[in-house]
Image (tube, rainbow, N blue to C red):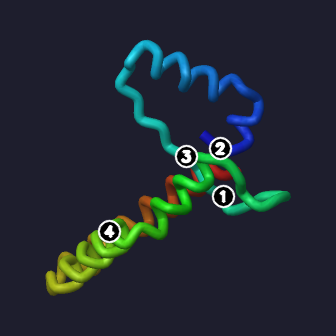
Amino acid sequence: IGDGALTGGMAFEAMNHAGHLQANLIVVLNDNEMSIAPPVGGLAAYLSRLRTDPMYSRGKEELENLLNRLPHLGPRVLKVIDRLKDSFKYLVVP
């Protein structure tokens, strides 16, 4: 869900309804880092805390270190992860 989709209200209402139904739901938030104003509100604050959380950063760093210690496979896996992340981002962002 892009940030623009939430402003129309339909995506937000759908997420509220899914919560009411207690449905298992995976929501992928796309932060394209483009904005006409500084991010505000609870969701922006939560995502900012998540990105700067020491446990998240440490876990990401430990995974990268572990993969880098695997002689032939590690760097390849890191490249695949980066490509998947970029591919998904460009799939969602026009």
Kindly report the distance in space between the C-alpha atoms of the residues bearing marks 4 and 1.
23 Å
Numbered circle sitting on residue 53: none
Whichever of callouts 4 and 1 sits on the residue coming sooner in the sequence is: 1
Residue occupying the point 38% across, 18% down: 22
Badge 4 density bin: few <14, some 14–19, many ≥20, Cα 10 Å: few
Whichever of callouts 2 and 1 sits on the residue coming sooner in the sequence is: 2
Residue under label 2? 2
Residue under label 3? 29
Numbered disc 4: secondary structure:
helix
Whichever of callouts 4 and 3 sits on the residue coming sooner in the sequence is: 3
* Residues under numbered marks 4 and 1 in contact, where contact means CB atoms less than 8 Å apart: no
Kindly report the distance in space between the C-alpha atoms of the residues bearing marks 3 and 2.
6 Å
Disc 3 marks a residue whose amino acid type is Leu
Residue under label 4? 55
Residue under label 1? 32
Numbered disc 1: secondary structure:
loop
